[in-house]
Image (spheres, rainbow, N blue to C red):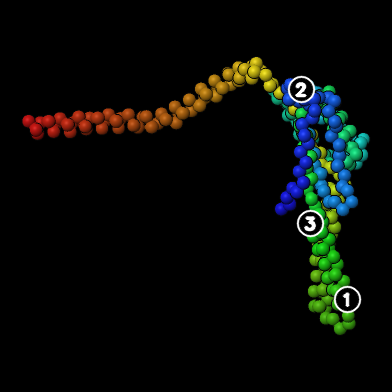
Amino acid sequence: MNKWTVALLLAALAGCSDKGGESSGAAALQGESNKAGSYLAYEHHVGIELPGERITERLAATRQACLDERFGACSLIAAEQSSGQYPRGELTLRIAPGGVEKLTALAAEGGEQVSRLTRAEDLAQVITDNRQQHDQLLRQQQTLQQYQSRDGLTVADLLALAKELAAIEVQLQALSQEAAQQQRRLDTNLLTLNFTGPRERSRLGLIGNAAARLLDNLAEGTAAVIEFVGYGLPFLVILFPLALLLRWLWRRITRNSVRDIR
């Protein structure tokens, strides 16, 4: 399994507000391109805080901008959205490095970026292994084709050679597809945008949330007690008569013992 060999955690932006968010004047997130001789597949994770009612709008606008390739080649991979008391959304897409900054700015319009993470996976070894397997299969294919062109081969030999050549062709196609996917990861950046509503950070906000959950907690607690009683009631029905029987037997035994002593 591939391991992350490069992890670049972007430092907290300067000028953060007292709430812990980033200021609007912070530097924008930029895409990353490979230098000559490097084989790094870059990924970006960006947290964006918006007013709850604007999450749907920003998510839809960002999604459409990707589909329209407004900021360069872009492919939508996944989209998720949930509403309710704490609305949120998430977009995962693959985009050309030059479009990362513009698309992120579009997504955060009217809000702020509260977190960002950039990391890269080194594909050098994987690409090298792929090329070596591809070259090895090509040599095997050429050797079999030379055997196939010889005279005096039986039908069984020709069928066996044809079967081996077909298997090699399938493997070559799979390696070519894998190489194309690896190149795509090198040429583009994977961008994940997490949209969340304002977070209640104040003490009063925490108290308000706790009060709002009071009735729910009360209902859940009551239901749990009733359920516990329901499970325990059959045991009480059995144990209570048994306890009376044991009490009667104990009193009888102790009474006989007293009589014997006398």
Q: CA distance from mark 2 to mark 1?
A: 72 Å
- Crowd band around label 1 with a 10 angstrom C-alpha radius: few (<14), some (14–19), many (20+): few
Amino acid, disc 1: Gln
Label 2 is placed on what type of residue?
Answer: Ser
Judging depth in this view, the residue of 94 and 100 nearest the camera is 100
Q: Amino acid at mark 3?
A: Gln
Q: Are marks 3 and 1 in contact (CB under 8 Å)?
A: no
Q: Secondary structure at mark 3?
A: helix
Is residue 212 visible to us here?
no
Q: Earlier in the sequence, mark 2 or mark 1?
A: 2
Displayed quadrant of residue 73: top right
For the C terminus, the quadrant is top left
- Which residue is tagged 1? 146
Disc 2 secondary structure class: loop
Which image quarter: residue 204? top right
Q: Residue at x 9, y 33 (%)?
A: 261
Q: Secondary structure at mark 1?
A: helix
Residue under circle 2?
17
Above or below residue 182? Residue 31 is above
Q: Please identify, in this view, whether the residue under mark 3 or under mark 1 is nearer the observer.
A: 3
First along the sequence among labels 3 and 1: 3
Q: Nearer the viewer, mark 2 or mark 1?
A: 2
| Quadrant of the image occupied by residue 129 | bottom right
